[in-house]
Image (spheres, rainbow, N blue to C red):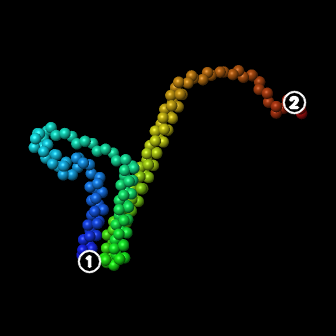
Amino acid sequence: MSSTVLYLAIVAVWAVVLVPMWLRRDTEATGISRLLHKRDEAAEEPAEDTAAPEPRRRVSRATVIARRRRRTTGLAALLVTAAAVVASGVAPWWVTLPPAALLTGHLALLRVAVGMDAARHLAAAEAAAARAAAARVREARRAAEEAEPAEVIELLTPDEVFDQYADDRRAVGE
């Protein structure tokens, strides 16, 4: 009976991995249909005329976060299910180890991903600040070049400068 539970646990773990992949795939561009399409194209046309593969579209941040959330939820549900099976006495305690290891590894990877996201965000903010500073410097140089030069006025200085501390002079009010 315990070997049956072990096989069911392995199938459940693989289902957590494979079902999201199957749900996520495109209708024509992936899987067997893509391989068959390439095989038929190679048989009908010469190899030089094969079309270039379409560039992959960027995955948005919301898509990545949703994928992480689904994976975390699925692994947590798998762990809770394994714990419930163990608590009911159907399986031995070690059946909870693979789901717990998967969830722990996934959470460790999420921690690294959050650090990478923060570093990427910081680098983007620093690059934007550097671009803004460079734009301000260019604008200041352009304004300085367009400004008229200052006119230098020569001031006439009298020959004798008044010094209130001179020997024979006094300031008013003394």
> Is 98 rendered above or below residue 141?
below
Label 2 SS: loop
**Can you tell which mark lies on residue 2?**
1
Image quarter where the C terminus lies is top right
Identify residue type, mark 1.
Ser
Mark closest to the chain's N terminus, 1 or 2: 1
Front position in the image: 111 or 148 = 111
Identify residue type, mark 2.
Val
Q: Residue at x 31, y 73 (%)?
A: 95
Q: Nearer the viewer, mark 1 or mark 2?
A: 1
Residue picked out by circle 2: 172
Would residue 126 appear left or right of 170 to someone viewing this image?
left
Label 1 SS: helix
> Is 2 rendered above or below residue 134?
below
Q: Residue at x 24, y 75 (%)?
A: 3
- Decide if residue 103 is in sight here: no
> Percent position (x, y) of residue 34?
19, 48
Front position in the image: 101 or 63 = 63
Using the rendered view, name the quadrant where residue 71 is placed. bottom left
> Percent position (x, y) of residue 87?
37, 76
Q: Residue at x 41, y 59 (%)?
A: 111
